[in-house]
DNA sequence: GCACGTTACTGTGTCACACACAGTATCGTC
DNA sequence: GACGATACTGTGTGTGACACAGTAACGTGC
């Protein structure tokens, strides 16, 4: 009765993570990196993301000019390297500020 | 150049808030309340939500069994009162735990 | 030297949610 | 009794998460 539907709970947890993933990408990619490695970094940091979610996200952030991207074709295995752009840095700062203010708001309400 | 597109920034800020609104509703509605008042409460707490977003959200949470709802028709102006259900409380706790762990993760990365 | 799992991506479709826009109705007040 | 504020409901539309389905190169074992 008081045990909520797992799907509903999972959905809301997902929603909660959503915006955070963008923040984490912009923060992590201040040091250049590629998708697959980022997946593992985020997973270790406690921010599991599906590959099918992360790759389109990276392309979107690139399209928006928040990430710079470049193919590394020198090494044997081709990898697309991303790095947070100047604009991305500005957005990151704004998101971090907002995050802290949300955190305070939640603390007050919870 | 390094000034990001306002729309893009606003979009990401929006995404960051998204899941938080559910959390805030469940937390606030441990004391019964109605939509319009909740709008103002959240706004004052630094969590501005559009009416067009909040009302459907409340109905969704009701449908999911996380909120109990009841029309108050005794007073002159009819108002739909919502209150966090037992299931809603369980979800709220899970979301709060997740929120804290996300906060730590962001701190580590940022 | 080639079969097979892992690494590292791209592309397409579906569904849910945020928000815009458009109503409805009641209350206070001037 | 007209008008703005209060307090909702209902119906689009667009975007993003995720599922599913590829593509391709690398390493290892046999």
Image (cartoon, coloured by chain):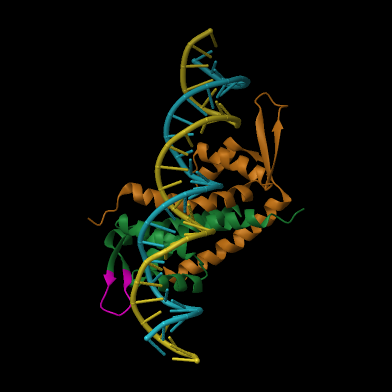
Chain colours: A green, B orange, C cyan, D yellow
Farthest left residue in view? B1
Q: How many marks?
A: 0
Q: Residue B77 lies in what quarter of the image?
A: top right
Residue depicted at 41% across the width and 71% down the height: A36
Magenta segment: does it hold A80? yes
| Above/below status of D21 relative to C1 | above
- The residue at the point 43 percent across, 55 percent down is A98
Which x, y percent locates residue C13?
A: 47, 49
- Dividing the picture into quarters, in which one does residue D13 lie? top left
Q: Which quadrant holds the C terminus of chain B? A: bottom left
Would you place residue B62 above or below residue A27 in this image? above
Q: Is residue A25 magenta?
A: no
Look at the image and tell me whether residue B32 can be seen.
Answer: no
Please identify the quadrant where the N terminus of chain B is shown: bottom left
Q: Nearer the viewer, residue B33 or B70?
A: B70
* Left or right of D1, for residue A70: left
User: Would residue A42 be seen by someone viewing this image from the given angle?
Assistant: yes
Measured from the top left, where is residue B64 in percent x and y? 66, 46
Answer left or right for C6 relative to B24. Answer: left
Residue A104 image point, x, y percent: 52, 57
Where does residue B69 sit, x and y in percent of width and height? 69, 39
Height in image: A40 above or below A55? below
At a point 60% along the width and 47% down the height, the residue shown is B25
- Side of B61 relative to A48 (left or right): right
Q: Which residues are magenta?
A: A71-81
Identify which residue is drawn at 66% across, 27% down. Answer: B78
């Amino acid at each position: 009765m008081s045990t909520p539907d797992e799907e509903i709970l999972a959905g809301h947890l997902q929603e909660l993570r959503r915006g955070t993933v963008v923040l984490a990408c912009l923060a992590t990619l201040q040091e250049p990196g590629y998708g697959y490695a980022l997946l593992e970094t985020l997973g270790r940091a406690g921010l599991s993301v599906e590959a099918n979610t992360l790759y389109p996200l990276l392309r979107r952030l690139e399209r928006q000019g928040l990430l710079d991207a470049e193919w590394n074709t020198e090494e044997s295995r081709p990898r697309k390297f991303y790095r947070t752009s100047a604009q991305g840095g500005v957005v990151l700062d704004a998101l971090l500020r907002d995050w802290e203010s949300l955190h305070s708001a939640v603390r007050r309400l919870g």
